[in-house]
Image: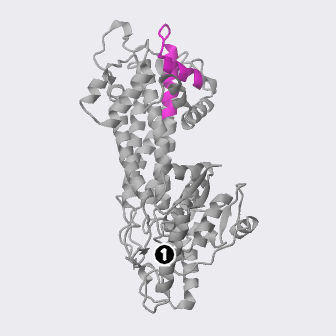
């Protein structure tokens, strides 16, 4: 099994995906263990002094003015975890919790948190044992980081609360730790606070969304090309020289992908009844511009994610010169903004895909295709309601595109008087990504059927490969009305699992 080694300088997006989704093992680098020990010496020295130090010998948030005596500090750290583990609502997904835990471990291993090496090792042990704390949907305002979600993870480290075992069963955490020979940790000065104070949940969801969107944007280029073919559109608008004079890199990549898929098509450039068509509709002609803008948004989001993956997010932090300083680096604004940007881009990509689907189904705009791609229009409804479903998904995505990061709600007796809402931005982006997958699946279903209805005209080899692959998984072609939900579910899985991209790339080579 693949092993991810965590050092002092952060981790990569591929590391996060390996641990969160593929169950990769986690090891601590020697440099990380040394950095943890050195930072802990600084915290222990400060804890022994009579002067109050935030997070070491004081309360937290609005209660930071109280100096805590040494005999109460273990209780203080235990209490902050218990009291902050106050999430509510449905459980979040296992991959999100694993990403959350791994990214907190990443910051702990930076040597800037003051956590003992044995606490970090226990965090790695939990991940390696497949023990996943129960984390709830609601509880994070994205500042000071993802407090409630991280607290539920820290609670499991202490052997308290509930967690999911490797078999998927939720049980008391103490039982699961005992079964795997993991000793619960007794938190000391600063450790409870250090386990709770980060943007790890929203960052993990950003990394996973970017991975999914990378596949979905390629998928959308493929379905846009299929729709262009089915509508007898022109590929001339995809010429590289046209996109070179407006040199947005994402736009050029999208156009190149569509052109690669359409290579060798016998459908493009034809016109119904030889009536010349000067221009295709915007939803066809401007597909690279819209998909390209989303790609460029993703490039910015990756830049933010990479910076955050290299960051040590905690408050206070231990500095190499021995200072322990309060800061505001836990604020989720940088991550929250790009999560919202991506939701906007995804909604627009879904919107333009739905417009192409609607055009395929409308006999007045489809250039000779039967109404709703029905076998016997009137007796058969064809894909009429499949487009309704697609439209409902798009409508929800538009609501999800409303920025969470534009909101702020004060907390902690006005000490935390401006928050990022980054966790909420991440949660709605996950829903948007799911819906985008379904929207693309419906366009795929409609476009492949429409191409097959163009008798006597041959699609591009890549398009034909896609049609054959999607038919092989149970997505049926033209014919009388049938129960559509299974076909749509199969198309959804075909897109979600990356098989659409794989089918096209088997002919085109790697798409951009």
Q: Is residue 214 above or below residue 386?
A: below
Element marked by disc 1 = helix
- Picture layout, residue 300 above or below residue 407: above
Tell me residue 345's x, y (percent).
38, 43
Residue lying furthest left in this view? Answer: 245
Left/right placement of residue 317 relative to residue 165 reads: left
On whether residue 276 falls in the magenta region, the answer is: no
Residue under the point 63% across and 60% down: 127
**Vertical position of residue 477 compared to residue 172: above or below:** above
Magenta extent = 440-469
Mark 1, residue position: 39
Task: Give the quarter of the image for residue 409.
Answer: bottom left
User: How is the model colour-coded?
Assistant: one colour
| Residue plotted at (41% across, 52% down) | 339
**386 left or right, relative to 266:** right
Residue 462, magenta (yes or no)? yes
Q: Considering the whole magenta stretch, tell me its main secondary structure.
A: helix
Q: Nearer the viewer, residue 371 or 350?
A: 350
Q: Residue furthest right?
A: 179
Residue 93 visible here: no
Question: Could you tell whether 436 is left or right of 118 in the image?
Answer: left
Query: If the image is split into quadrants, where does the C terminus sit?
Result: top left
Q: Is residue 82 placed above or below 346 in the rendered structure?
A: below
Q: Where's residue 364, x and y in %?
A: 38, 18
- Residue drawn at x 66%, y 60% is 131
The answer to which quarter of the image holds residue 143 is bottom left
């Amino acid at each position: 099994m693949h092993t991810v080694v965590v050092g002092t300088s952060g981790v990569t997006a591929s590391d996060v995906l390996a641990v969160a989704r593929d169950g990769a093992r986690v090891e601590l680098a020697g440099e990380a263990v040394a950095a943890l020990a050195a930072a802990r010496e600084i915290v222990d020295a400060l804890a022994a002094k009579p002067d109050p130090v935030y997070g070491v010998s004081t309360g937290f948030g609005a209660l930071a003015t109280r100096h805590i005596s040494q005999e109460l500090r273990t209780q203080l750290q235990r209490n902050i975890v218990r009291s902050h583990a106050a999430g509510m609502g449905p459980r979040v997904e296992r991959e999100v919790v694993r990403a959350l835990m791994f990214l907190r471990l990443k910051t702990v291993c930076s040597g800037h948190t003051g956590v003992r090496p044995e606490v970090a090792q226990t965090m790695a042990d939990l991940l390696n044992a497949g023990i996943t704390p129960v984390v709830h949907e609601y509880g994070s305002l994205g500042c000071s980081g993802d407090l409630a979600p991280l607290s539920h993870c820290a609670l499991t480290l202490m052997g308290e609360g509930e967690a999911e075992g490797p078999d998927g069963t939720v049980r008391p955490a103490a039982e699961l730790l005992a079964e795997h020979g993991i000793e619960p940790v007794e938190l000391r000065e600063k450790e409870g606070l250090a386990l709770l104070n980060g943007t790890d949940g929203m960052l993990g969801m950003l990394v996973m969304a970017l991975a999914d969107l990378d596949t979905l944007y390629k998928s959308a280029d493929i379905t846009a090309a299929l729709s262009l073919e089915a509508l007898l559109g022109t590929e001339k608008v995809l010429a590289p020289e046209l996109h070179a004079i407006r040199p947005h890199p994402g736009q050029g990549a999208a156009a190149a992908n569509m052109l690669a898929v359409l290579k060798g098509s016998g459908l493009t450039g034809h016109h119904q009844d030889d009536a010349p068509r000067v221009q295709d509709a915007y939803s066809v002609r401007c597909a690279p511009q819209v998909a390209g803008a989303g790609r460029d948004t993703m490039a910015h989001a990756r830049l933010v994610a990479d910076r955050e993956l290299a960051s040590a997010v905690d408050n206070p932090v231990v500095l190499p010169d021995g200072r322990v300083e309060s800061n505001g680096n836990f604020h989720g604004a940088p991550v929250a903004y790009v999560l919202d940007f991506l939701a906007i881009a995804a909604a627009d990509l879904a919107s333009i895909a739905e417009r192409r689907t609607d055009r395929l189904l409308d006999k007045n705009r489809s250039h000779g295709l039967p109404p709703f791609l029905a076998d016997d229009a009137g007796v058969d409804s064809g894909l009429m309601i499949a487009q309704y479903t697609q439209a409902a998904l798009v409508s929800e995505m538009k609501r999800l595109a409303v920025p969470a990061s534009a909101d702020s709600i004060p907390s902690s007796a006005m000490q935390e008087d401006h928050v990022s809402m980054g966790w909420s931005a991440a949660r709605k982006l996950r829903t948007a990504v799911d819906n985008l997958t379904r929207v693309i699946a419906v366009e795929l279903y409609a476009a492949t059927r429409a191409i097959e209805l163009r008798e006597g005209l041959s699609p591009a080899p890549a398009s034909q490969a896609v049609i054959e692959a999607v038919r092989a998984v149970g997505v049926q072609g033209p014919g009388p009305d049938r129960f559509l939900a299974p076909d749509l579910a199969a198309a959804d899985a075909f897109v979600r699992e990356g098989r659409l991209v794989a089918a096209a790339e088997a002919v085109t080579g790697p798409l951009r």
